[in-house]
Image: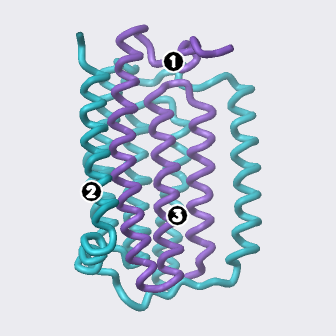
Chain colours: A cyan, B purple
Amino acid sequence: MVAQNIVFGILAAVMGIAALRVVTVKNVVHAALYLVLVFAGVAGIFILLASEFVAVVQVLVYIGAIVVLFLFGTMLTRAPIGRADNLDQSGAQRGLGALVALGLLGLLAAILYDAFGESKVEVTQVATSGDIALALFRDYVIPFEVVSILLTAALVGAVVIARRD
Amino acid sequence: MYLVQFLFLAAFLFCVGMYGVLARRNAVLVLMSIELILNSVNINLVALGAWRGFDELVTAQIFALFVIAIAAAEVGVGLAIVLLIYRNRASVDLNEVAEMKG
């Protein structure tokens, strides 16, 4: 239990700092690399919650595919690879954004603590990949097929949008 | 482990992502902030599932997988739109994309 809390603390600290760097850093490539840290931290949190399959999918899809997509997007839009000063809104709008985000964070923290302050997570049984597969292909087959149709539609749509006519 | 520690982490990531959406001007960076928001939702789903018990944990993981798949589709279409904007105006500054502003 203590070991889990220590691991959670380390992961949360790394993720918090990396997430803040993603939204403040002045270099698009560095933002993508900090995003990798956040995604890896989320995968660690999933492992802490005994969700091995989702953790592996997180690493494969987010770190393996989505970050690469972001880097391609950065290159194709010829965003400045080095430091750039035109990535952020004006100071006033950033201040307003920070105000809204902090307000929402305070509100959420108060409500969540009020609702779940005493609840403890005790994982007694690991949900293995076999359990996930059984549930996915027995109870959730139709949503699964709908998601595959959605992915095909998104792929075709992305090609149609980005095609050079 | 308390449930709230996961929920606080997710809330923090959500708020950081929201700040990124509001404070960034480069479209690719706004998409990255949206990914932060989607990840916080996944942490919430899995943590609440683990809190409820084994069956709910399995269900929560399946929902998290669906969210991951939809996030992948969203990034693909989003970056295609960003590329189209770049091709039309040689810039991905969101303040310049204001045709629909009243």
- Label drawn at residue B93: 1
Instruction: Please name whichever residue, B30 or A44, is drawn nearer the observer in this view of the structure.
Output: B30
Q: Secondary structure at mark 2?
A: helix
Residue B88: x and y in percent read: 39, 9
Task: Give the vertical position of A69 relative to A10 (above or below).
Answer: above
Q: Are marks 1 and 2 on the same chain?
A: no
From the viewer's perspective, tell me whether residue A52 is left or right of residue A24: left
Q: Secondary structure at mark 1?
A: loop
| Amino acid type at image mark 3 | Ala
Disc 3 marks which residue? A12
The residue located at (45%, 24%) in the rendering is A83
| Amino acid type at image mark 1 | Asp
- Label drawn at residue A24: none
Label 2 Cα neighbours within 10 Å, binned few <14 / some 14-19 / many ≥20: few
Marks 1 and 3: which is nearer the front? 1
The residue located at (71%, 60%) in the rendering is A108
Instruction: Please name whichever residue, A7 or B56, is drawn nearer the observer in this view of the structure.
Output: B56
- The CA distance from mark 3 to mark 2 is 35 Å
Write down the quadrant of residue A116 in the picture: bottom right
Q: Secondary structure at mark 3?
A: helix
Write down the quadrant of residue B79 in the picture: top left
Which chain's residue wears label 2? Answer: A
Residue B50: x and y in percent read: 48, 79
Disc 2 marks which residue? A145
Instruction: Please name whichever residue, A77 or A157, is drawn nearer the observer in this view of the structure.
Output: A157
| Amino acid type at image mark 2 | Glu
Which chain's residue wears label 1? Answer: B
